[in-house]
Image (cartoon, coloured by chain):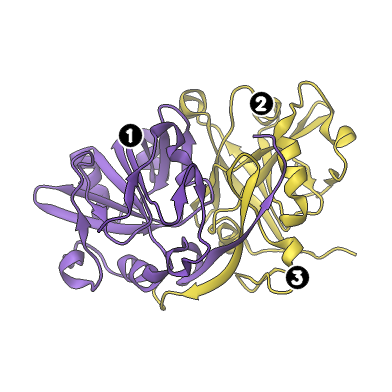
Chain colours: A purple, B yellow
Amino acid sequence: MTYRRPVPLDRATRLLNHGPTVLVSAAHGGRSNVMAAAWNMALDFMPPKAAVVIDKATFTRGLIESSGYFALSVPCSAQAALTTAIGGVSGKDVDKAATLAGLAWIDEPESPAPLVEGCVAWLACRLLPEPHIQQTYDLFLGEIVGAWADERVYSAGRWHFEGHDALRTLHHVAGGHYLLPGDSVEGGAAD
Amino acid sequence: MTYRRPVPLDRATRLLNHGPTVLVSAAHGGRSNVMAAAWNMALDFMPPKAAVVIDKATFTRGLIESSGYFALSVPCSAQAALTTAIGGVSGKDVDKAATLAGLAWIDEPESPAPLVEGCVAWLACRLLPEPHIQQTYDLFLGEIVGAWADERVYSAGRWHFEGHDALRTLHHVAGGHYLLPGDSVEGGAAD
């Protein structure tokens, strides 16, 4: 049974607005890999775009540059140790999906890059090649071509984590220490 | 009495890692202005850098391009209505500091751009001019040249909001609805 449901593209950026750490995945030439990235953000509404920082030392970067696609999966509290472990080894050394307990791929026809199972939101992205900023700032931009979320904690354009503590998103501070979303507050009607 | 304390530059990005909404401010030619931006992220460790999306329609954008500086102030729960109000009017129409109750500037010699009083962290940034991505994606990059945080909720490289609910950072979802950081979780030692 899956709780993964499509999110309309014109609301896809809402999955990133609150600043979760994401898992960045890509596949090329028979290899798949994934890395963790606190440094990500939405970039545009429609067509929706996102930005993410991907260090030159990462194996995932080569897969993205070769395939032209990447995916952002939004991990949850139950995956805190997995998220840290994903960031602690390199795909240059190990096949993470074969090595790390709890890491499995979702094959989604609309995403050339594999999605990470057990996450609470997913964004399939097509790389928008910008060689200068990729080289100078390790900054990668993508057009969001598909979006999904776990209906238990996200629906009708809102996150609702109440009653699902294990599914709260992860917000990295440093050293494997993550803040989780708790209460919410209304700041009025303007948007 | 102020609780604002300097944060070492090599740890400045930790103020943004967990994905808070920020207030982007700038000053030029006798005018100061501020806007709200959920779309921001850290970009590099040392020298520290940050990225933020700034729409062409904003008055703040012109102040940044003219002065070459901007500041990111991290607002807190007590400022939810102010943060939404800041995003609801344009500096083209009103002097926000003269109009919006609760909006006041901190003059900080190390930041050519004014900081917003009552926030819980502040980053003074020097614009890294990248005309192509500014024009194409509304994407602005800055080197962080000064950083401060409210010692009641941030010290020794960690956020600690316990006992200070009004000082929790704001994480915008949509329509003036913000999530606040609650519990934390440890994902192990890797970083």
Residue located 74% across and 69% down the image: B164
- Badge 3 and badge 1 both on one subunit: no
**Which quadrant of the rendered structure holds the N terminus of chain A?**
bottom left
- Label 1 near label 3: C-beta < 8 Å? no
Q: Secondary structure at mark 2?
A: loop
| Amino acid type of the residue tagged 2 in the rendering | Thr
Q: Give the chain of mark 3.
A: B
- Label 2 near label 3: C-beta < 8 Å? no
- Badge 1 and badge 2 both on one subunit: no
| Label 3 vs label 1, nearer the camera | 3
| Amino acid type of the residue tagged 3 in the rendering | Arg
How many residues crowd mark 1 within 10 Å: few (<14), some (14–19), many (20+)?
few
| Amino acid type of the residue tagged 1 in the rendering | Pro
- Mark 3 and mark 2: Cα distance apart in space: 33 Å
Residue located 68% across and 56% down the image: B147
Q: Is residue B111 visible?
A: no
Q: Which mark is residue A131?
A: 1
Circle 2 is placed at which residue position?
A: B58
- Compared with A72, A9 (above or below) is above
Q: Is residue B84 visible?
A: yes
Residue located 33% across and 34% down the image: A131
- Compared with B107, B98 (above or below) is above
Q: Which mark is residue B152?
A: 3
- Compared with B42, A51 (above or below) is above
**Which percent across, then down, holds residue A64?**
24, 44
How many residues crowd mark 2 within 10 Å: few (<14), some (14–19), many (20+)?
some
- Label 2 near label 1: C-beta < 8 Å? no
